[in-house]
Amino acid sequence: MTDSIRALLDRVPTGLLIGSEWREASDGGTFDVHNPATGEILATLASATQDDARAALDAACEAAAEWAATSTRHRSEVLRRAFDLITERAEDFATLMTLEMGKPLAEARGEVTYGNEYLRWFSEEAVRDYGRSFPAPEGTLEMITRRKPVGPCLLITPWNFPLAMASRKVAPAVAAGCTMVLKPAALTPLTSQYFAQTMLDAGLPAGVLNVVSSAKPSDVSTPIMQDSRLRKISFTGSTGVGKKLLELASQNVLRTSMELGGNAPFLVFEDADIDAAVAGAMQAKMRNIGEACTAANRFLVHESVAEEFGTKLAEEMNKLKVGNGLDSATTCGPLINPAAVDSMTELVRDASDKGARVLCGGERGEGEGFFYQPTVLVDVPRSARAAQEEIFGPIAPIITFSTEEEALEIANDTEYGLASYLFTQSIDRIWRVSDGLEFGLLGINAGVISNAAAPFGGVKQSGMGREGGAEGLDEYTSLQYLGVKVER
Ligand code: NAD
């Protein structure tokens, strides 16, 4: 490890942020954070216990009334200062994400820009706290609506986008006047720890944001969710864990935002610009090493262009350089852990057993880290696991179709409904297929559409609620209606 990386890691708090202080766990417990490119230990963090979780909620509840009473301009300016500080510290954040999550440094820099945009966007949205005023149809009341902070929130984030998943929850919560307890993923908590310190440096008062990293996630979530003072949970992660949390949330009828798994179809029609579709496919599949909920999971390609598309996609995949994300030549980093590599091996074996052909890749990568080669599979039957499950890695299965109806039927044949992609040059088809796709997000001739200004979220078992856009702020407010008697 170089001196500059050691110095950066020394700047990351390793304790639990509860109220105004970073402290040890109540039982002194810790857990290690590893670099997936080398397997080495990067840092040892305090691991929150149930008592720590309760203390963090206490701090959030104590700060709630005062924070809710601050002006929207004040909250906006805290967020804007945090945006400026993250811009100054961009290289620190990018390096931390490459170290703990594995993505190539250039992509990590991209995530700093993307994740930081949530702070700028919600600093701008914070002051647009519009209500409505209108007369009752009978003329007897003046009816007013206004929004209030929903109250203390529990925010749980996944490991794959360590900055953006935290900022797109924390920024709207701050803007709305909520206090919160953030539980980052144990695999990649360093970015969140550094992010929380940056929020404090930007002037966020003690207790508004509390951070409880832990090796035992349910030790944090269960006591907090059973406490009647909690008002909301916002969770991003797998559908399985999301369902458990929804059950728990029902006990106190919590407001819930659930950003869950995906199984994105990527439709390429016979009238598509194939080179543009391949470029879009590389982005939609390989951004974040394929470890994204929005990652193209199933390539549904018209039979007349499937061979050309598959050949060109394999050519591009073969150009990727697998390696440590800190190496400037690397364009595809390691997977998050050994289990993820095993999972890729199993998916390829299952597809091959069912008749698929491996056009490129299909093997583990070389080296100490958790590498897997970028892989293209063709002639993949719909029964293959790679065609049904969330892959979360660098495998692109190609399935052919012959009609638009068949493409839509295959695309919607999943319990998920997060992202989908459509490549065609026909305007009429864009509308028809958009009408037919049961997904919350649709990229039209575009491989990446995530944006802080857009409402991000899914339908079906991909979840509920939206993050980003004007809608992202609504998730942290509750609507109050005032009926004022009018005597005329
Ligand atoms: P995960 O569900 O295993 O973990 C997510 C978070 O939940 C982590 O912080 C983890 O520590 C915590 N957690 C795990 N078990 C828990 C429990 N029993 N109680 C409380 N908390 C618990 O998911 P992951 O592996 O970190 O992330 C990958 C998943 O996240 C994929 O399914 C992906 O599609 C999804 N994801 C969705 C979005 C979206 O916006 N829809 C974005 C990114 C990732």
Image: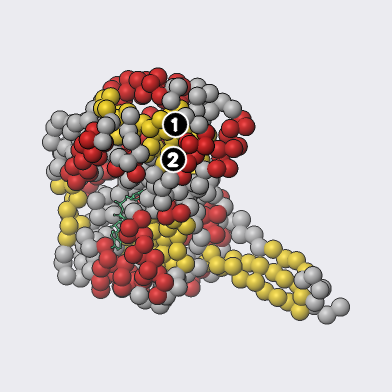
Number of numbered callouts drawn: 2
Position of the N terminus by quadrant: top left
Crowd rating for badge 2 (residues with CA inside 10 Å; few <14, some 14–19, many 20+): some
State the colouring used for the structure image: secondary structure
Residue 439 coordinates in the image, percent (x, y): 49, 46
- Residue furthest out toward the right: 488
Residue 291 or 421: which is nearer the viewer?
421
Instruction: Report the side of 467 relative to 220 (left or right).
Output: right
**Left or right, 68 with reference to 62:** right
Q: In front here: 304 or 33?
A: 304
The kind of secondary structure element at disc 2 is: helix
Q: Residue at x 40, y 75 (%)?
A: 251
Residue type, numbered disc 1: Phe
The image shows residue 399 at horizontal and vertical percentages of 38, 32
Q: State which image quarter holds ligand 1.
A: bottom left
Answer with mark 2 or mark 1, whichever residue precedes in sequence. Answer: 1
Please name the residue shown 22% across and 47% down the image.
Answer: 9
Question: Circle 2 sits on which residue?
Answer: 410
Q: Which residue is mark 1?
A: 401
**Residues at badges 2 and 1 in contact (C-beta under 8 Å)?**
yes
Give the image quarter of residue 56: bottom left
Percent coordinates x, y for residue 103 in the rendering: 29, 37
> Which amino acid type is shown beneath numbered disc 2?
Ile
Disc 1 CB within 8 Å of nearest ligand 1 atom = no
